[in-house]
Image (cartoon, coloured by chain):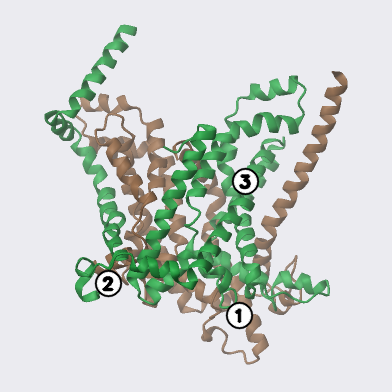
Chain colours: A brown, B green
Amino acid sequence: MKNNSIKNSIDDTVFEIFVYIVLGITLILVIYPLYFILIASFSDPVGVNTGKAMFFLYNPSLEGYKRIISDNRIWSGYLNTIIYTAVGTTINVVITMMIAYPLSRRSFSGRKAITLFLLVPMYFSGGMIPQYLLVKSLDLLDTRAIMVLLSAASVYNIIVARSFLEANIPEDLYESASMDGCSQFRFFSAVVMPLSKAIIAVLALFYGVSHWNEYMRALIYLKKESLYPLQLILSSILIENQVSAAMVDDVLLMEEKNMLKELIKYGVIVVASVPVLVAYPFLQKFFIKGVMLGSIKG
Amino acid sequence: MESLLDISKAEKKNKLYDSITPNRFKRTIIKDWQLYVLCAPVIIYFLIFEFGPMYGVQLAFKDFIIGKGIWGSPWVGFKHFERFFTSYQFNIILRNTLVLSIYSLAAGFPFPVILAIMLNNIRGERFKKIVQTTTYAPHFISVVVFCGMINIFLSPSTGIVNFFIKQLRLEPIFFMGKASMFSHIFVWSDIWQNTGWAAIVYIAALSGINPELYEAAKIDGANKLKSIWHVDLPGIMPTIITLLIMRIGKILSLGFQKAYLLQTPLNIDASEIIATYTYKVGLLDAQYSYSTAIGLFNTVVNILLLIMANQLSKKFNDVSLW
């Protein structure tokens, strides 16, 4: 018996060391590519190409960022994205909370029917073309409105919010409030919303990130470049390799031009990801809460 | 106390029974009208933008003529489906979709489970936190930026991966230009991006396991590996199965964005999937009916797959989505 437990504790120590090593390697695998992009964006492009900026800054310079800042397309993309994210997220959060509250009430007569109604499109949807034709017939092609309207609410987030309200707003709270003549509207705005700050943060984050990263909707519904969100501008720079001519046309040598293009790519990745990554450490405990709420009743 | 409960139960039953009669039904709606008003914005949004397109699904069985609109266009039966099934692209895009999807599932599914179990079995709380925070982060990188990163890292002339390959005195590889490389790039980059995020659900499930079970396993002489096998895994099995069913149901709805963004003319033989093909045929070539038919085919297969997977899991594990 004793031998066994000693053997076990040796086994366990070996096992734990092994786990630490594997997790350590995982950590490096995740961090390194991000770290590399960051240092490369601040380094001399020649150094990056010859492997001198693999682990540390090489000849630090702001050349790439200077060229990015002077580019109009990126500015207008940024501005559009901020508009879509701010307006879109506000609408999302408000109407999600509005429907999540009734659905969280066991006494609400429409609870089952409405839940079912919301679940149908998860399994059966019209598809890309019918949706496109619908948007076209509503005269919403090439408008800012479509970027906000087409994702006004997600079923997943409604379920997350509903689970939160079920657990945190007791049914009899309203009953006692209604004795004092409180209507459901007032109860919702004066009691439910203030008590739901945590879930509102979660929703704002989920919706906010999806607006910030939205690409496909813009690709399908927007033609005017002045309406393009950041992601669409990024795709032309990063994927189609179309750094605008103005950004590099003062450089004559082809090779140097290509290096500058690479430098600009590193830079735009950083510029586009900064808002999300800066907010991330502060918000991550909310994200986790949200996923857990969703997993209970997903 | 008990009798009180009974009364309230009886009352509930009565209410339920009553609510079926039309008069009562009307009255409950009047009672809850404010709650219905709160639901209205989302319901209207769903009616227009989620259910609205369902009306257009009939295009799959029609020849769309712009002047006549969706309703007025002539019926043509299964013409578009026949054309799709007999076209030479059918095999290619179906194969590519299945390969990418099943490869992702087979290679990607175990990693979050393993990560969660490893995190559950170490003692250093701070290290655990650091690993969790770091591995979640890539999930928030947008798909455009992520594909841009893949392009940059794998570039044959300036990419860091080929830099190392050249250091080893080997020929640089043009990753994005090879159809044979596409599935590996697609799947393994996905694992890099989403393993940490997908692990959250399992971490939550593991934290819900009764600690006494670990104690009991220890007393019975189990080492860590054995307690993982006999306590951790059974504890999260229902979660694993539920997520597996959902993944199987989505096997043909492989995301459009990443495949589209990683496509190059050189790897198109491996990277054209149902979603990207629907987009090109539908929006770029304006063959609305044909594209709708392909989309409908996709949806129907998905539903069948989901029902099948759910049936299987009900039979073997007593876990069901509905």
Does the residue at mark 2 contact the one at mark 3 (Cβ under 8 Å)?
no
Q: Please give the chain letter of the residue carrying mark 2.
A: B
Q: Is residue B82 above or below residue A236?
A: above
Q: Residues within 10 Å of mark 1 (few under 14, many from 20)?
A: many
SS under mark 2: loop
At a point 51% along the width and 83% down the height, the residue shown is: A244
Q: Chain of mark 3?
A: B
Amino acid on which the number 3 mark rests in the picture: Pro
Q: Position of residue A221 (x, y in %)?
A: 36, 70
Q: Residue furthest bottom?
A: A252
Query: Label 1: which residue?
Result: A261
Count neighbours of disc 2 (C-alpha within 10 A) and say few if under 14, some if 14 to 19, many if 20 or more: many
The residue that disc 2 covers is: B64
Same chain shared by disc 2 and disc 1: no
Query: Which residue is identified by label 3?
Result: B112
Q: CA distance from mark 2 to mark 3?
A: 46 Å
Is label 1 on the same chain as label 3?
A: no
* Picture quarter with the N terminus of chain B: top left
Mark whose residue sits in front, 2 or 1: 2
Q: At which x and y percent is residue A294?
A: 46, 41
Amino acid identity at mark 2: Phe
| Res. B146 in view | yes
Residue at position x 18%, y 29% from top?
B20
Q: Nearer the viewer, residue B135 or A198?
A: B135
Given this view, does label 2 or label 3 mark the residue nearer the observer? 2
Q: For this view, does B78 lie left or right of residue B158?
A: left
Where's residue A85, x and y in %?
40, 60
